[in-house]
Image (spheres, grey):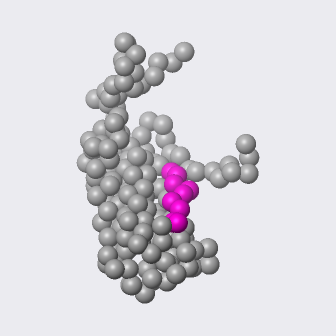
Amino acid sequence: MERLTHINEKGYAKMMDVTEKEESLREAVARGSVYMKKETIRAVIEGKIKKGDVLSVAQVGGIMGAKSTSVIIPMCHNINIYGADLEFNIDKENCKIDIIATVKTYGVTGVEMEALTAVSIAALTIYDMCKAIDKEMVISDIHLVKKTGGKSGDFYFRDLSSKC
């Protein structure tokens, strides 16, 4: 059986040693959604949320989340992020805001967790900004869309929800 990379000889958790890994350009894209009431979507669009511009604050929150990943996820390495951006798509028909985060680095470990954290923190920021008028918002569908670079190669999400 192959040995787990984050377990030491005594069976305790450890941070993986990446000193022997090759540096490469790495990129990860993650996405997620925040479902809300029609009135909440309208308030976001019209700038009527009392805490301020929801998507601007969520943009900054998502970037801060990407930069803070190693502080809040126990086995993540502290890495240099060379780029982080978020995109928000308001879907009025389905009463949701879709969030897409793209994170890039050049280094020995990937940025999948940073992209996923960026989406998660942006979604939580949207919730926080809008909760005074809508406590029934649902954060869902957070997943890795793609990752490029590194020894394991590229990954592209395949929607297997209809398959078990």
In the rendered image, residue 121 lying in the magenta stretch gets the answer no
User: Which residue sits at x=41%, y=72%?
Assistant: 132
Q: Vertically, is 84 above or below 69?
A: below
Horizontal and vertical percent position of residue 11: 40, 16
**Quadrant location of the N terminus in the rendered image:** top right
In the rendered image, residue 138 lying in the magenta stretch gets the answer yes
Q: How many labels does the image show?
A: 0
Q: Vertically, is 12 above or below 28?
A: above
Camera-side residue of 88 and 22: 88
Horizontal and vertical percent position of residue 126: 41, 67
Q: Can residue 27 be seen in this view?
A: no
User: Which residue sits at x=46%, y=48%?
Assistant: 148
**Quadrant location of the C terminus in the rendered image:** top right
User: Which residue sits at x=50%, y=78%?
Assistant: 41
Q: Is residue 42 visible?
A: yes
User: Which residue sits at x=45%, y=75%?
Assistant: 133
Residue sticking out furthest to the top: 10
- In the image, taking residue 146 as reference, residue 104 lies left or right, namely left
Secondary structure mostly seen in magenta is strand
Camera-side residue of 70 and 146: 70
Residue sticking out furthest to the right: 163
Camera-side residue of 76 and 120: 120
Residue extent of the magenta highlight: 136-144
- In the image, taking residue 120 as reference, residue 21 lies left or right, namely left
Horizontal and vertical percent position of residue 62: 35, 61
